[in-house]
Image (tube, rainbow, N blue to C red):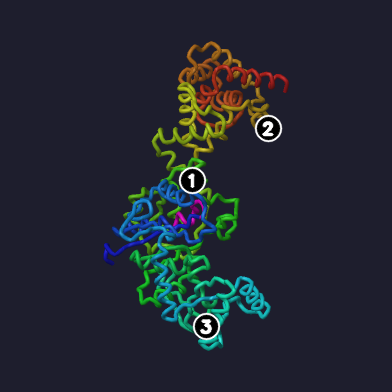
Amino acid sequence: MANNAIRVRYAPSPTGHLHIGNARTAIFNYLFARHNKGKFIIRIEDTDTKRNVSDGEKSQLDNLKWLGLDWDEGPDVGGDYGPYRQSERKDIYTPLIQQLIDEGKAYESYRTEEQLTADRDAQKARGEMPHYEYEYAGMTEDEKQQAIADAKAKGLKPVIRFRVPKNHDYAWDDIVKGKVSFNSDTIGGDFVIRKRDGMPTYNFAVVVDDHEMKISHVFRGDDHVANTPKQLMIYEAFGWQAPKFGHMSLIISADTGKKLSKRDESVLQFIEQYRKLGYLPDAMFNFILLLGWSPVGEDEIFTKKEFIKMYDETRLSKSPAKFDSKKLEWINNQYVKEADNSTIMDLALRQLIAGGNIPENPDNKTIEWARQLIMLYKREMSYMAQINDMASVFFQEPDEIDGDALAEISNDTAPVVLHEFLDRIQKLTIFDSVEILKTIKAIQKDTKIKGRQLWMPIRIAVTHEMHGPELPESVELVGKQKAIEHIKQTLAQIDKA
């Protein structure tokens, strides 16, 4: 395999945000190119003008860059094989379609949508698989030309259909799936290669683009397997060599075992959503790569450089990949723990602002308080948006203590600890975690109360939580005045019990 011959592409449609499945396709192609010292190309497949959305292309490229991908050629960086948007390549497609027509390998089709629907309904009624029936069947050439002339006289616009060879097997050695074969009689008849608006269809344009851009390998999702025989027919019709194909396994929900559907709103499926929640790009890259690919050994956390070095397309799985949101949280937490504090501070502060817990333009005192809060929870957060819920005790007045927490402080020693703690912190001139820790240890020394009976009443009284980050730091962040108020409220509640 000559290194300089490796050319792969990721070809998104600007019809919406970057989906997890499409991000995986991009990452696998990217790693294959970088591992083999080849070229990674971005091509925008925007011929479906009705489905294209405003800023769809920008969203795709921005999210790919956020994931850490770079490319050698594309609509934003140029290259020797452009244009890199299909909508700008019409002059390339048109003469090639005409060539197929001239050679009798394609033809004008004037069947209306109403006629095609009626055909499909009749086929279903007969128990047949819906398929296109050749509209000029049994006609002489003169009769065919007369039918075309009559259709034009009615003002009908044709599509161009490719003439599918009869009873011909199209096979390829798939990099992931192994030997795959389709008989031409099973694909649904002659298929459209140019729509009524003059734009080529996906199955035609992708072949032309891959050939013209000298694409050597095509890695894409399993849902494209059925497109491959149609594309092989186009390659054959022009006498071109097809690239090597690799169709990656489906992504299924770990909860339901069903294919991950964009309509399933119980699972976040778009990169943009994870960015907004404060996930880290390197963690997302790591997690997505493990959807259908496995490294040698048991380790799962690697840098991008390590992934590039170890990447091996033969380790792509044939089995469906399970999308497990809990595993994603675990992986992201590993990255959060190792991330530099400034990165975490920046992302989490944005979440606190978005959650309405910090002013949009905080002053220096608030920023420093937020920094202490964020660092307190850094090791516990799986993603940054969790800071709002995890640290809610610092923003909301707690409810009355009940349940296990109330049972925990319903003993003889809890009031002793709380009265001592209240009296001593009221006298503190410096209210920080160092002085608070000294105060707790002094109470232990003077009262001989220690361990859970010492620490838990203070935590429950001040934060109304039984678990949380370091207690002295938590008390400091609650603040002296609120801590005093909370302890007084707790003592009053104990007295009433």
Q: In this figure, which residue is indicated by the disc labeled 3?
A: 145
The picture quadrant where one finds residue 424 is top right
Lower position in the chain sequence, tag 1 or tag 2: 1
Q: Is residue 465 above or below residue 279?
A: above
**Nearest to the observer: residue 436 or residue 18:** 18
Q: In this figure, which residue is indicated by the disc labeled 1?
A: 330
Determine whether the residue tagged by mark 1 lies in a helix, strand or loop: helix
**Which range is magenta?**
15-24
The picture quadrant where one finds residue 215 is bottom left
Q: Residue 236 magenta-drawn?
A: no
Q: Is residue 175 visible?
A: no
Residue type at the position of mark 2: Gly
Q: Is residue 200 above or below residue 273?
A: below
Distance CA(mark 3)–CA(mark 2): 86 Å
The picture quadrant where one finds residue 233 is bottom left
User: Which residue is rendered at x = 73% and y = 20% of the image?
Assistant: 496
Residue type at the position of mark 1: Trp
x, y percent for residue 353: 52, 31
Determine whether the residue tagged by mark 3 lies in a helix, strand or loop: helix
